[in-house]
Amino acid sequence: MNDLTFGKIQDLSLEPLKPPGLRYLFTIAILGAVVTGAIVIWIIQQKVGMQVTGLNNPVGWGIYIGNYVYWIAVAMSGTFISAMLYLVRSRFRSSISRGAETMTVIAVAIAGLFPLIHLGRLWVVYFMVPYPQGLQVWPNFTSPLVWDMLAIFTYMVTSWIIYYMGIIPDAASAWHKEKVSPGPHYLRAKIHRLLAMNWHGAASQWRHYKRSYLFLAAMATPLAVSIHSVTSWDFSMQLLKGWHTTLFAPYFVCGAILSGSGYTMILLVPLRNAFNLKSIIKTEHLASLSLIMIAASIGLGYEYAIEPFLGWYSGDIYGKQFHAFEASGWIAPLFWSLLFFNIAVPLTFINRKLRHREWYLFGASILINFGMFVERWVLTCASTAHDYLPHTWSAYISSWAELSITAGMFAFFALAILVLIRLIPIVPISDVKEEFFAQTQEKSENGIPELDTGIRIERVRPSDGGIAGSFERVSQLVSALESVLANSYRKVEVYSPFAIKEILQIFREKTSPVRIWTLIGALCGIGFGWFLTTVTAQENMLITGGKPPIAITPFWVTVFELGVLFGAVAALYSFIRLARLNKRERWPGFLPEYSRDRFGLFIACGENEAANIRSLLQQAGSTEIRDIAPLESGNAHALPASAVQQEQASRNG
Amino acid sequence: MDKIMVKPAYYRSRQGQLIFWSLIAVAGLALWIVLVSLGSRSIWTATLSSFLFFFTIASGMFMWTVLMSLSRARWALQIEHLSAASIGFALPSLVLLGVLWAGAKVWAPWPGGHFPSGAYLNTSFLFGRDLFIIAVFWILCRIYLHRRFRENAGRIGGIIALWYLVGFTFLALDLVEALQPPWKSSLFGPYFFVSALYAGILFWTLVSVRTAGDEAFHDQVKLIVALSLLTLYAFYCQVLTIWYENLPEETPYVIPRLNYDWKWISLAVVIALYFGPLVLLLLRRWKLNRPYAAAVCVLLLCMHWVQCWWWVEPAFSIEHVHLSVSAIAAILLTGGLFMISYVLSIGYVKRFYSEKVVVT
């Protein structure tokens, strides 16, 4: 990042948002045609029934469920990588997180479609929602299928929230740029305006933003693990060899991390080349991602090894014959190839030279994802095709309809990615700037002065007037803030294109009320989860699988999912309310360049204090000092921010 | 890289500590000999529980040193020698396992038994391979310490991590799962080594309470919360899968622990050890309150001992909980040995960090 500046980071990141060329539109058209074809085939399947698939007796789960598991895996790892790396304060997170999150929000939507496609009779899907069906029976919350639906819904909502949270500051940056060129009436500019809401990069907004993002990351990490664990339980809660094992959940999670990291790689390598993002998404970042893939492949290898070993250890003849079938039956070529693609290929990243070659990483990631797809296919159909009764042993070959719909979903993924990268910056601009600042700060010998964290800042009102100063460097901004606070001015606001840790400390980031809201939301979700599971079980009073109707052990799954769902929604809601994003009000002293590469400081004051503040700002190195006239209360809420700025500009001459 | 100054808090009263822990160990040894000579079986199972307790702490603690290096984390460098000092338990752990081997005829279920895996559960083969696994682990740790600040530290760190993954799966299988031979669970290995990492971070935080900087201490406490959740996840995945299918080869582990007297112990372990940190260390100011955090660590370590005991004892006493003087004797003996070795090895480990960390 040596040759970068805050402005250059912004320009490079917003480059993909420029109007696309013909080649792009042609690709979109081709992908759209493939997706349309898949939709037509799906309609045919609805019309003539599941006979168009290769499903048979006993293989009732085929490529659709394999697809579901595969796409859930891709979806899981995006948010997991982003949230987990955020929690451990990883350096390379900022470059890859948006790519991973974009992948997640699309993949989870695709994954959610496959159970519906597999269902055949789509209209009975409401059996799964918490609503009594025709026979007045509520969904059974001890069933993994009900957990699955709940987990997908929770994960989809939470992933979209995290994705949207990350977009807010970047959408504001894009909006401030686009309202100048190509103009505020362009559709893209309007979308960014809508997404940014009333974000102005004020410290009093960053304060709540950072806290809510932290809590969302803290909730999303176990949630991401839970979603793929729940998917694994669809299999491991059944009495079939190859499916029923206690290790299935962590094994699925490892597989998901491997395929998702691979997908992130497949996405980022062409993008960084196509949009000249190599100085932001560096080869080292891709190499770091490949290290995660090594760890995940070792986890997968552990599972591949432990299962046959335990089969031998316990003398389980069914287990032994199933593993022999995998190794030497009709499925053996696929089984051995998935071992190669999922274990041998990622382990080549141990070689330092190989993991620093981007096109090698790209090619290997494609192979790994091919291997993971094969693995999901084998996993789904092998156990049913080779169960306990030799006379029912069978084979399964995916039909043209199944393969077409599968291809359609891959095309839909590519299509959605291509649309989103033209709409949303593919790198998180504010995070990259923050990381860039942290790195330059480390190299710089002159650190920024420490602020007195005991000072209590007062909130600036929309109608306040005062003095505003612009700064080119953070150190100047902090010096100005220090001297302003030392002179007992407490009603201040700071504007910056990224969160500045030192400044947020005095704005009491740690005590943001977001934490209380999130906790209350999560507790409400937990309470509702227990209520829903126990009351519906009480109402049904059905003994299924020899289990008591009110079974505490499996109810925890529902309770956890609802706890996270309510907590995540509460975190977003409280952030929007506390950061005043829902109000189109004036932010005194704000200028659009504060979302790019300048820093602003506004001090609310009377006319008699203005001269003193002006001199303090000047001493600190302010490049521009402006008088901001107060507005009469009432007007402040009525006017949109841009109108207020124009009014100020005219007042200031 | 600049040298980091470390407060000398832990080196002041070394002699006093050694005398104190020696007295504890001697008292434990005397009581242990008396109980063994009386032919008690419970002293052996209590010794196994205590061995698992201190061995998981020691190995888990050293693994944190390795993980810090593998993840290139620098925040813990200032206190890393306090985790690396757990290497001192290498010899006592081998001796204790040797003692358990010597007494296997009295307490172990394997001598004379017939199992599907045949000679795999032969007593000598079982203890022989476990001694080998532990010995290789400590040898690798010793090599790693020597190369900690050299270029190829990552390579040896990776080998240790792999050995930990594989070797500790066998240890879990041999020393806990195999106590109830029909029982098998593919998740018990990961559950065991994640528990060891959890125990390791607990003890490391406890001994760093006066030395660590605020940020490092905060990170350690956050790791406690993370590891408690990870252990809970492993525990839950195992219980849920077994509970759901109710298969005869899987339920021998779960039935005693979810029923009879043991269900209360299970409840205590789940509430205190797995959910405890999430509640007790929820707020930042609680995490940074060192006396409070240290007290929570002590409570959680006590519960970890209960967990190790709960892994072992229900295999021998399915319905009833017997907590006798045997447990006290085993804790005093193994605990005394652990602490003596730990205090002695701090001085030994210090030299490996003298290049980068100044211990005044």
Image (cartoon, coloured by chain):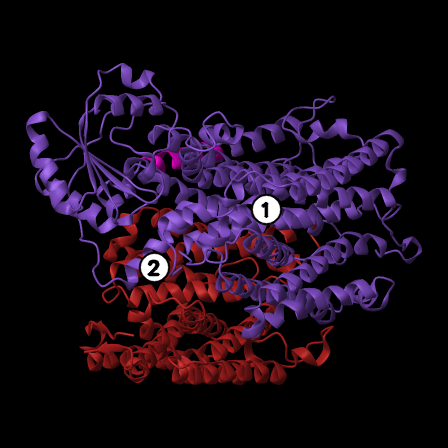
Report the chain shown in purple.
Answer: A
The amino acid type of the residue labelled 2 equals Gln
**Magenta region, main secondary structure:** helix
Drawing shade for chain B: red
Q: In the rendered view, would you say B93 is above or below A270?
A: below
| Mark number displayed over residue A321 | none
Q: Is residue A627 left or right of residue A500?
A: left
> In this orientation, does residue A510 appear?
yes
Task: Tell me, yes or no, whether dots 2 and 1 are on the same chain.
Answer: yes
Mark 2 secondary-structure assignment = helix
Q: Nearer the viewer, residue A549 or A405?
A: A405
Q: Pointer 1: what residue?
A: A103
Give the class, few, some or many, for how many residues have Cα within 10 Å of label 2's Cα (few <14, many ≥20).
Answer: some
Q: Nearer the viewer, mark 2 or mark 1?
A: 2
Residue A499, given in percent of the width and then of the height, sits at 33, 45
N-terminal label among 2 and 1: 1
Mark 1 secondary-structure assignment = helix
Residue located 38% across and 66% down the image: B73
Q: Is residue A284 left or right of residue B88?
A: right
The amino acid type of the residue labelled 1 equals Met
Q: Pointer 2: what residue?
A: A439
